[in-house]
Image (tube, rainbow, N blue to C red):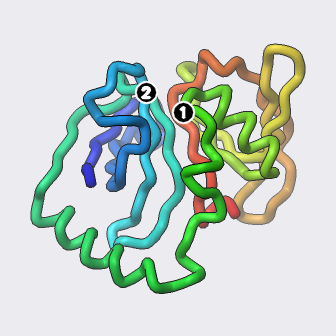
Amino acid sequence: MYWLSFNQGKTVEEAASTFVGTVMNDSIQANDGYFLLETLDSQGKWNGYYWFKNSMVDSIEYDTDYLKKVSIYEDYWKQDKYMKPSLSREDFKAYDPISILDLAIEKHKVVTVFTKEDREFNVGFVRKEGKKYKLNCISLENACSLGDFAFKAEEVVFIEIDSPDNN
């Protein structure tokens, strides 16, 4: 289990985020340029899959007292049938952004996407049109459509999929 500090410095709030979880692609030292993290919240509850580029990570910690605490909580929540992901590791054919976006389309999943040029996260249902993707952005407060957001997979620096907040 790892604790990652993620600071893109571009959001409206200009705030850093931290994520706790298990890296799915081989190892955190893998030279893929990105990784997929099975995340947990501060109470050890399932929190979704987060894909991001290595360049977005400021620091990585492991074997800390905090991570040991989260691990204990995680063991407790594993018994709760409502705290499990709807996607399994086997659903991920690969860990690149195209494969993850295509999985979201196939499974009709709401995703959160952040590109190099964004100032805030975009949330919605994704579809593919030619070589571009379009996100039908929705408000998480009332599920109203906020319009389309077009992007290319190579512009993406962060994807959240199968999050309890987005399901």
Which mark is in front, 2 or 1?
Answer: 1
Res. 29 image quadrant: top left
Horizontal and vertical percent position of residue 158: 52, 34
Q: Is residue 145 above or below residue 126?
A: below
Quarter of the image for the N terminus: give it.
bottom left
Horizontal and vertical percent position of residue 69: 20, 72
Q: Residue at x 43, y 27 (%)?
A: 34
Q: Is residue 15 above or below residue 20?
A: above
Q: Residue at x 58, y 65 (%)?
A: 85
* Secondary structure found at label 1: loop
Q: Are marks 2 and 1 in contact (CB under 8 Å)?
A: yes
Res. 55 image quadrant: top left
Res. 21 image quadrant: bottom left
Q: Is 24 displayed left or right of 133 in the figure?
A: left
* Secondary structure found at label 2: strand
Q: Residue at x 29, y 35 (%)?
A: 28
Q: Is 78 displayed left or right of 90 in the figure?
A: left
Residue 34, label in figure: 2
Q: Amino acid at mark 2?
A: Tyr
Horizontal and vertical percent position of residue 67: 20, 62
Q: CA distance from mark 2 to mark 1?
A: 8 Å
From the viewer's side, name the closer residue of 42 and 149. Answer: 42
Q: Is 145 displayed left or right of 30 in the figure?
A: right
**Going from the N terminus, do you reach mark 2 or mark 1 first?**
2
Horizontal and vertical percent position of residue 144: 85, 56
**What crowding class fits label 1: few (fewer than 14 Cα within 10 Å), some (14-19), or many (20 or more)?**
some
Residue 130, label in figure: none
Quarter of the image for the C terminus: give it.
bottom right
The reply to whether residue 119 is in sight is no
Q: Amino acid at mark 1?
A: Tyr
Q: Residue at x 37, y 35 (%)?
A: 26
Which residue bears the numbered disc 1?
Answer: 95
